[in-house]
Amino acid sequence: MATHEAIPFLPGNTFRDVTKTDFRKAHTLDYLNGYAIQPNPILGIGLTPIPHSQLSGPAELLAKIKSDPRLTYGSKQHHHAAATIPRFVPAHVAFDKVVLRFDAYFKQTVHESQEQYHLRRVRIHYFVEDDSIAVVEPPVENSGIPQGVLIKRQRLPKSTTDYYSVKDFNLGINVVFYGKTFRIVSCDAFTERYLRESEHIVLNPPEPMPKDPQQIARNRPHRNPSLKVEHHDKLRRFLENDRKVLRFFCVWDDRESMFGELREFVLHYYLVDDCVEVREVQKPNNGRDPFPILLRKQRLQKTLNELTAVYDDAYYTWKDFKIGGVINVLGRTFLIRDCDEYTKRYYHENLGVPISTMQSIPIISPSDGAVVEQEIPPYNGYGSVEDSLGSCKYLVLKPPKKDFIKMLENEHKILRFVARMESRHKEDQNRRFVISYRLADDTMTIYEPPQRNAGILGGKFMERTRVLRPGSSLSSPQGPAYYVAEDLVVGATIEIFKHRFVLLDADEYVFNYFEERFDKSRGSSAEGGRGGAVSGPVMERSDRARILGKVVQASRSGRVAVEKSALLERLRGMDTKRSGVVDRKALLDACADTWRGVIDQHEAITLCRQFEPTPRKVDYQRLLDATFA
């Protein structure tokens, strides 16, 4: 045995009986007289007797007493009790029938009733054995509510991953079971002792159980009319105050709420029974249904914010009304601004109020017939601007109107311009674009011709769309402002979606179109037609006579820096074929310094077009003779 104890208890150092085949285990739990007991096991695995559990017989005990002197005289070490090993006790045995009880309540909302809520008292039972909880409502006689077990015994979830435990309970706290909030106010003596001694929980002070206001009102004793000291003679009051009605003029200012306004009402107070009637003052074209009565004839309560106001005698009387006072009519704040002459005399005779102090309060409201400017909401980005604007102007939606005459007259009419991009980036300064403007719907497209060794892919730069002018937006109250044909002038700079383009040139159709429009407008104005002259930057630059007059006047006044002979020699040097004509672009470059400050680039092209025998070939001799005449 000593040898076995000296061997370390490690894998490979233990010995077992290889001949053993029975590994049954004897039960150790049993019941005795209805109580759960756990006797000491006397049989081990395989039903083999346990040596230390077997008791010695009487002969062996007597032999030990005679042979062992320590049993006779005692030993020092036997004065101390041997250390006992605590036995394992299951939870269902240790905490059997251990239940914690808490007193709580919750409020049940009552809809469509004068009662705001019902206060329902419950008892929360916490079973320490398996952490299960049960909620029971003690029955109340004649309550009219099904009572008893509200939540049967089960483990209640505290969150998606946790359950309630005994550590989560205390006094004066709220617990939530399945979305319903319970307020714990107190507990019994056993629960208080268990939480303090076993769980070491510091309990909050208990709270008193609140009372149900509806139950208090029901338990009020019935009044005995024979015990009243004061007796109201209704017949006498009817005879004295019949047909006596006080009339007050009130206003309800509801302008702080959405779609609210200042509304006028007339309040009638009947002295015979202290009832109040409120009628609305109907005005023509106010947009409201003709429903004049706001409050039918009844006693008017002062407040409805508290539940007790339903049962208290807090009603308005004629002494509570005065000019400049504020009253509460079913949650609406009314200002008494005036009353009739009979009401003033009644207050003067019964309360001694001077009539001179009862002055009317004027109503401050917008003047009748004032035009209210319609506020257009900002553009939300859905559909076109005109389509969205139609929902603000019309009750019945209508599609935006299109100018079909303009579309038919200008179908397939396109104005094309050559432009360059104005950018601070060096690689974008030499890029060239073709801007096409369609007169049918005022849309623009931009195309970039491919250039060799430019490093930029050409192609479509901008889809067909309408372009806003700088400073305009889709959500502008005045509406968006788009580029029109009259804004496109050669030499001008236009901004298209944060990109700046300088118009360098245009095709011949552009100049022919604007010059024809100018001639037609001038002819119609001279004949007294309805159209009149067409205005715009490009129209002013299409007046050929005005442009030629400006250049002639500048040459006569000496504002031209270069003389005619010097300019003629320069143009003859450019005419290598001696044909008498030069290219328009070359002539414009040669005359740029001469006409600087007199005419701009578009006007210079319009001037040169008058002396072109063939397109873009200018007869420079005739041009100089006309400008230096």
Image (cartoon, rainbow, N blue to C red):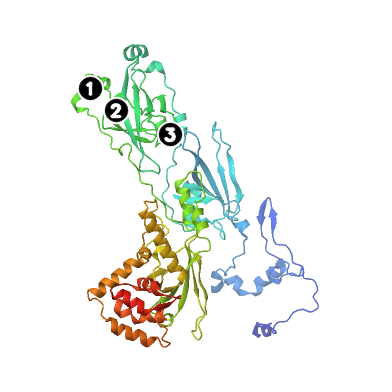
262, 438: nearer the viewer: 438
Q: Which residue is mark 3?
A: 288
Residue 455 position within the rendered picture, expressed as x and y whole percent measured from the top left: 50, 84
The residue depicted at 61 percent of the width and 59 percent of the height is: 91
From the image, which quarter does the N terminus lie in? bottom right
The residue depicted at 79 percent of the width and 75 percent of the height is: 20
Secondary structure at numbered mark 3? loop
Please indicate whether residue 249 sits to the left or right of residue 517 in the image. Answer: left
Question: What is the spatial separation of the Cα atoms under label 3 and label 2, in whole angstroms?
Answer: 31 Å
Badge number at residue 220: none
Q: Amino acid at mark 2?
A: Asp
Q: Which residue is mark 2?
A: 320
Q: Amino acid at mark 3?
A: Arg
Residue 288 position within the rendered picture, expressed as x and y whole percent measured from the top left: 43, 34
Q: Which residue is mark 1?
A: 351
Please indicate whether residue 413 sits to the left or right of residue 518 in the image. Answer: right
The residue depicted at 35 percent of the width and 73 percent of the height is: 604
Q: Earlier in the sequence, mark 3 or mark 2?
A: 3
54, 178: nearer the viewer: 178
Q: Amino acid at mark 1?
A: Leu
From the image, which quarter does the C terminus lie in? bottom left
